[in-house]
Amino acid sequence: MWFWNKKHTIAASGILQGAADHHSHILPGVDDGVETMEESLHILGTYEELGIKELWLTPHIMEDIPNTPEKLKARFVQLQATYNGNITLHLAAEYMIDNHLRKLLPNHSPSYVRGASNTVAEGDRTIIPLETNNSPSLPRGTTRGSVVCDDGYFSTQKECPIGATKGEGVETNSLLPIGNSGKHILVETSYFNPPMRFKETLRQIKSLGYYPLLAHPERYMYMDNDEYRRLREEGVKFQLNLASLAGGYGKAVKKKALWLLENGFYSVAGSDLQCEDAIEYITSCKLDEKSLMNVAQLLKNRI
Ligand SMILES: [Fe+2]
């Protein structure tokens, strides 16, 4: 029998055993998070003691911090070579929805187009054949092999649509997706105002074959419950920031987080960790048993 009003800390509840943290700034020296390899290794040691088994490193990519996948991958390789523990490390990124991201999206490299025939794909998507389209006026930002969608957006999505052929010549991806399926892009916005072309950018991400995974939705002051519902209906997924439940961003944010949690909006959870001190803050957060059960499920979830 559950006594929903009884409260426990996240640490004492045991819900971190086997958990996956889907949001962190622990990759050292690449953004406003952890600065040194030594600090990263120390945090990973603490994570091991807590029982965390999977960690997604999600450095910022935005106009002010224009990290490239190549730079981040090189730093990730260094961390992996230095770390000898039992936590599985993954590299992704947290993309601010801004002009920098919009410039990246149309250039996302296709993995299936080379070798595709003169195919017209199913439904509302049309592939511009890589080898045969000689039109000098491809849609702005597209390359041969792009997919043009009925809403005017175009895609060079990773997966081979029905009717297209997955061929040789896989090119380097310009995005760093999050999740084991490789089908999610972690995005954030300003906390105060919606970004320009917000919905359009979300649709563009979807047209590439990804689900937008919205980081810490509870922190966006301009979003209300109806907006969360609309975003969910449009295929956006949500990621809980554990520090929000601890009250780290104020009572209003905590209230929104609890509402989103109770109503099943979140798919996964993350720490958004930027320094070691935050671990104690998050793990000492007290929650009632119903909330702990919901958070436990998010920490188990893999996407
Ligand atoms: Fe973050």
Image (cartoon, grey):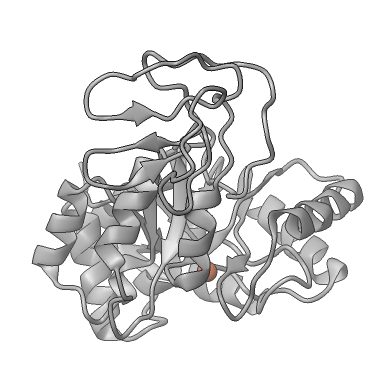
Viewer-side residue, 219 vs 145: 145
* x and y percentages locating residue 296 in the rendered image: 39, 47
Q: Quadrant of the C terminus?
A: top left
Viewer-side residue, 218 vs 237: 237
Asked if residue 151 shows in the view, the reply is yes
The quarter of the displayed image where residue 115 is located: top right
* x and y percentages locating residue 285 in the rendered image: 43, 71
Viewer-side residue, 20 vs 235: 235
Left or right: where 152 falls relative to 140: left
Numbered-mark total: 0
* x and y percentages locating residue 301 in the rendered image: 42, 39
View extreme (right): residue: 82
* x and y percentages locating residue 122 in the rendered image: 27, 19
Residue 221 vertical position relative to residue 166 in the rendered view, above or below = below
Picture residue at 68% right of the left edge, 34% below the top: 171
Left or right: where 228 falls relative to 268: left
View extreme (left): residue: 226
Picture residue at 58% right of the left edge, 75% below the top: 278
Picture residue at 33% right of the left edge, 76% below the top: 195
Picture residue at 74% right of the left edge, 70% below the top: 30
Viewer-side residue, 245 vs 236: 236
Left or right: where 277 falls relative to 189: right
Residue 62 vertical position relative to residue 78 in the rendered view, above or below = below
Q: Quadrant of the N terminus?
A: top left
Asked if residue 52 shows in the view, the reply is no
